[in-house]
Image (cartoon, rainbow, N blue to C red):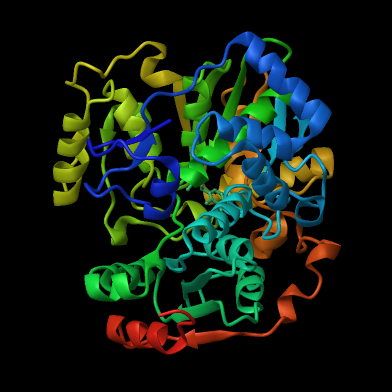
């Protein structure tokens, strides 16, 4: 299996794109073709999921996309990534029925209580494995608004060939998110706090990456959601969730979306021939994606048009993974994607596909549906689900459940649970009058200490911090 860029580069092998991230032409890597599963293949996978459990199942699915890591090594990787110890359950990603026709796919049982653990735990193992094989090391430089940073740090905590510098906006994260990240006391994990917003953090990361000499010297890499290894790890739970619910027929998914990373894996699963009926993209007030799927116009927001909401992990100005979907939408036309994303979007333009020949596709835009959820919707949905079921959902999952209820059909609908409420106490209190209970495995998170360094003087200071603390360079 080889990978090509949405803008034309490649083909390249999996382990190369693993360490590379973005393609050299600025595009995103996708498989040359999607592996196809027959009904017999799907039945076989179900036997493995039920008989051997999630780690083995994950290795089987990953092996469909990865031919430059031996299967035994792949299985060792997934067995280290998905343990009962880290996820609190042998099922890893259980699914259960919330109300008639509507199921919850629990993706947030991992070490940092958000779905990002599902992919990041595998990514950490992949990095450790491949850097070991190549006898190399790497510096991960990233920015987080909350969930990505902690998921990355917990995933790379044991990866001895990786050092992490993670920028976070001072004072913008929830107490739980701060406690989890800043509580880590290891020279390989460096938390850098920035007075400002997530965008300010990202600008600093970009500025450091714009210095090729520095980047080369410290072997700076990234773990953001455009990394194909993260996406393919997410395909696994779409298939396992479907297999837990479907009775031979189709299922639909509703996914709380920001960067289009999670739901893009659902799209890939469907392209592999799995019986996925509709993919419903739920957004918060930052409705870039909802606007596209209702109007055919994709308009990236400026930072002043990007709202700070109570489902903060979906507060995006553009959907970083959208280009992958567009590649398929255009019939895999790299020239068209290069034009739209490399030129139009990069110059502040708007993508309008209404006059494009591919605008009407079978299953109208691949069967995507959409809906918007606001702060009032989140509060009402958290309160309602709690009153009916005694179950507390987090604000992002609430966006999903609100929109999922608007799209129920004859087939089962699975709403993806992307975080646990303990991460977002304030809105829970607003909805039900008290903060969520602290699960036993997170006891002590809030007073684990603050291991951070402040960067308030710009990119040169950030480089100085990296140089001074680097364990390798
Ligand atoms: C990251 C995140 C999302 C959005 O996922 P995308 O892949 O960016 O669409 C939703 N909910 C939670 C809790 C998250 O951490």
Tell me: 71 left or right of 432: left
Based on the displayed image, in which of its 4 quarters is residue 7 positioned?
A: top left
Nearest to the observer: residue 299 or residue 182: 182
Quarter placement of the N terminus = top left
Q: Nearer the viewer, residue 325 or 199?
A: 325
Q: Is residue 82 left or right of residue 303?
A: right
Residue found at x 56% / y 16%: 37
Please tell me which residue is depicted at 65% across the width and 51% down the height of the picture. 419
Where residue 110 appears, x then y in whole percent?
Answer: 71, 53
How many dots with numbers? 0
Q: Residue at x 60, y 65 (%)?
A: 159
Asked whether the viewer can see residue 372, the reply is no
Tell me where residue 101 appears, x and y as whole percent: 72, 21
Q: Which image quarter is the C terminus in?
A: bottom left
**Residue, x 58% and y 51% (percent of image)?**
116
- Residue 48 sits above or below residue 469 on the image: above
Of the pair 153 and 470, the residue shown nearer to us: 470
Q: Nearer the viewer, residue 413 or 381?
A: 413
């Amino acid at each position: 299996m080889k990978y090509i860029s949405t803008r034309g580069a490649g083909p390249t092998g999996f382990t190369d794109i693993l360490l590379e991230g973005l393609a050299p032409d600025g595009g995103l890597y996708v498989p040359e073709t999607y592996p196809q599963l027959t009904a017999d293949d799907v039945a076989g996978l179900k036997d493995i999921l039920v008989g051997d459990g999630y780690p083995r199942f994950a290795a089987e699915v990953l092996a469909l996309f990865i031919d430059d890591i031996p299967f035994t090594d792949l299985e060792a990787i997934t067995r280290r990534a998905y343990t009962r110890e880290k996820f609190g359950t042998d099922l890893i990603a259980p699914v259960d029925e919330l109300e008639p026709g509507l199921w919850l796919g629990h993706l947030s049982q991992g070490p940092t209580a958000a779905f990002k653990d599902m992919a990041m735990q595998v990514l950490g193992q992949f990095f450790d494995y491949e850097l070991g094989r190549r006898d190399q090391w790497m510096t991960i430089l990233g920015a987080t608004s909350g969930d990505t940073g902690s998921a990355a740090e917990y995933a790379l905590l044991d990866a001895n060939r990786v050092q992490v510098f993670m920028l976070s906006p001072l004072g913008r994260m929830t107490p739980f998110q701060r406690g989890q990240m800043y509580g880590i006391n290891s020279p390989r994990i460096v938390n850098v706090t920035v007075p400002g917003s997530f965008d300010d953090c990202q600008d600093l990361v970009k500025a450091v990456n714009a210095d090729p000499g520095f980047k080369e010297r410290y072997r700076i890499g990234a773990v953001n959601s455009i990394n194909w290894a993260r996406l393919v790890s997410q395909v696994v739970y779409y298939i396992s969730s479907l297999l837990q619910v479907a009775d031979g027929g189709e299922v639909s998914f509703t996914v709380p979306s920001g960067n289009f990373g999670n739901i893009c894996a659902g799209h890939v699963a469907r392209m592999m021939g799995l019986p996925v009926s509709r993919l419903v993209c739920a957004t918060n007030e930052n409705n870039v994606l909802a606007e596209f799927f209702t109007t055919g116009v994709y308009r990236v927001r400026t930072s002043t048009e990007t709202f700070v909401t109570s489902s903060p992990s979906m507060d995006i100005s553009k959907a970083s993974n959208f280009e992958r979907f567009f590649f398929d939408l255009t019939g895999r036309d790299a020239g068209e994607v290069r034009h739209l994303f490399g030129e139009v979007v990069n110059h502040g333009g708007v993508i309008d596909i209404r006059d494009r020949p591919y605008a009407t596709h079978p299953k109208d835009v691949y069967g995507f549906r959409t809906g918007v959820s606001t702060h009032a919707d989140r509060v009402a949905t958290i309160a309602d689900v709690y009153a009916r079921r005694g179950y507390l959902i987090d604000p992002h999952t609430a966006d999903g459940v609100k929109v999922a209820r608007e799209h129920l059909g004859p087939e089962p609908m699975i709403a993806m649970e992307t975080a646990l409420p303990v991460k977002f106490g304030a809105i829970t209190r607003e909805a039900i009058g008290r903060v969520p209970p602290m699960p036993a495995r997170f006891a002590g998170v809030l007073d684990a200490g603050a291991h951070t360094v402040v960067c308030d003087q710009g990119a040169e200071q950030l480089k100085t911090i990296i140089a001074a603390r680097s364990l390798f360079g």
